[in-house]
Image (cartoon, rainbow, N blue to C red):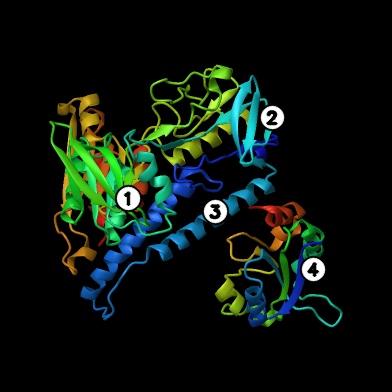
Amino acid sequence: MGWEEKQVRGFPEFVQTAQRYHGRPIFALFCGDKDAEGRSWCPDCVTAEPVVRKELHNMPEESVFIYCLVGDRAYWKDPNNEFRKNLKLTGVPTLLKYGTPQKLVEEECFKAELVRMLFTED
Amino acid sequence: QEAAKYGKKVMVLDFVTPTPLGNSWGLGGTCVNVGCIPKKLMHQAALLGQALQDSRKFGWEFTEEVKHNWMTMTESVQNYIGSLNWGYRVALREKKVTYENAYGEFVGPHTVKATNKRGVEKLYTAERFLIATGERPRYLGIPGDKEYCISSDDLFSLPYCPGKTLVVGASYVALECAGFLAGLGLDVTVTVRSILLRGFDQDMASKIGEYMEEHGINFIREFVPIKVEQIEEGTPGRLKVTAKSTKGNQIIEGEYNTVLLAIGRDACTRNIGLDKVGVMINEKTGKIPVNDEEQTNVPYIYAVGDILQDKLELTPVAIQAGRLLVRRLYAGAAIKCDYVNVPTTVFTPLEYGACGYSEEAAVEKFGEENIEVYHSYFWPLEWTVPSRDNNKCYAKIICNIQDNERVIGFHVLGPNAGEVTQGFAAAIKCGMTKEQLSSTIGIHPVCAEV
């Protein structure tokens, strides 16, 4: 297949994982935490996840896809949370190409075409 | 994007031919990538340097020496530009505009060939075409120019600090770049063939030049470079420039780390197959003449932007012309682009904003006896405490006596000139007279109240 997925939760784990794969194309999808039944508190994330997963095969060879749960709703709403402060995330879901200004936010993640563009662009 | 809004099937072909030094960039054109955006950001970087100096007089105390890191600035600027490039990609895709990063050229009626960077060619046909290929910097045509000199196309992403720089030219590009490079602490020299800011009000141009000279920028006037040689390779290297006087046989030499050419821009119209479809261009300048509806001599081919003959080379003008054109074609609108009274700003260290006629143009059009010029020097309040110049900021308006003293020219030299000028441009468009201006109460204490 040529790419691999890593699932992480919280900012420190995300950073550690991204650093470990430095040098390879890294894409990350940030979503709200899931409950015991596997449903996220973030309805847009629920919509976006299957769309993104369907396009993963378009990522370049050797890519790493990091699926990152950011935390519960209260944590996310805090304007000083680490994701907002350090990665400049403004909303969930966010799909981004790590280390570049390329990202898709919220409803943009619902569009297969845009997701595919993010994965295949130079 | 406008055409797609009206349900048309649209394709954009954008391709950047790399500079002689191999530099290229993303979607967005000159303004976004190698023009207005990075220019204003770097101008701001220089202004912040000045602000740090001023701040001590306002009570800020810091013991560390303040230095500037070129790489940090350039990385931030390029990052921002990258987000704009990406934003345009997303916007086009969302509006269902097909985008190809390929070089477009006409090969026959209603047909273009698109060649991508790997050399793969595709043919496309369309009902109508819009050419907006813009311009690229001109080179001097002297030995060493392409090998050793850089242009504005390279400056904003230069991966090393340019060091001691020679700027060739006295266009606004040259002066703006010289201005911010000096503001960042670099040793800058400008070599001018004849006058500064050709086409702009010369009274204002000489004030701008004077200010720059008094603030550490060297000017070598009435000389043109005839040779550039490399003394030492490096990032930056060392270059030797030989220049000849325009008024005699005097030759001078100088050593610089970087030579930045800013002597003009040439339209990208020579290699896009216009001859194959019969589009007329001005052979001498490469510009395309169009009627007042931006149509070329070939009815289904239109053009906007810097490549137009006798039109202002400004991003907002091109954007407006493009949007209005599409609305006329597909939305039944009748409004044409108004090229008169377009405001501009030159972001030299002392900023210059203008709208309407220069003093010379007004005199030529209306006669000296029919115009009245009101002017004033002013001292921005923010400059008083740090003891900055008290006699450099300047504003003047030119009025047409025969038409109720209507304001036909507005010129201001001072901080935030762009912000000041925008409002006055709207007033001029409404036909403001001197009396109306005088009876408008000023905001205090701001420069614009003058």
Instruction: Name the amino acid, label 2.
Output: Tyr
| CA neighbours of label 1 inside 10 A, class few (<14), some (14 to 19), many (20+) | many
Tell me whether circle 1 and circle 4 mark residues in contact (CB < 8 Å): no
Residue underneath mark 1: B177
Instruction: Name the amino acid, label 4.
Output: Val
Residue underneath mark 2: B124
Q: What element carries label 3?
A: helix
Residue closest to the far right: A37
Q: How far apart are marks 4 and 3 (CA)?
A: 28 Å
Q: Which chain carries label 1?
A: B
Q: Distance between the residues labelled 2 and 3?
A: 27 Å
Residue at 52%, 34% (x, y): give it.
B132
Instruction: Name the amino acid, label 3.
Output: Leu
Residue underneath mark 4: A46
Residue underneath mark 3: B84
Q: What element carries label 4?
A: helix
Confirm whether residue A39 shows in the render: yes
Image coordinates for residue B293, horizontal then vertical, percent: 51, 25
- Which one is earlier in the sequence, the residue at label 2 or at label 3? 3
User: Which of pointers 4 and 2 indicates the residue nearer the eye?
Assistant: 2
* Residue A36: quadrant of the picture: bottom right
Above or below, comparing residue B298 to residue B129 in the picture? above
- The one nearer the camera, B379 or B190, is B190
Residue at 51%, 55% (x, y): give it.
B81
* Numbered marks: total: 4
Give the quarter of the figure containing the N terminus of chain B. top right
* Residue A22: quadrant of the picture: bottom right
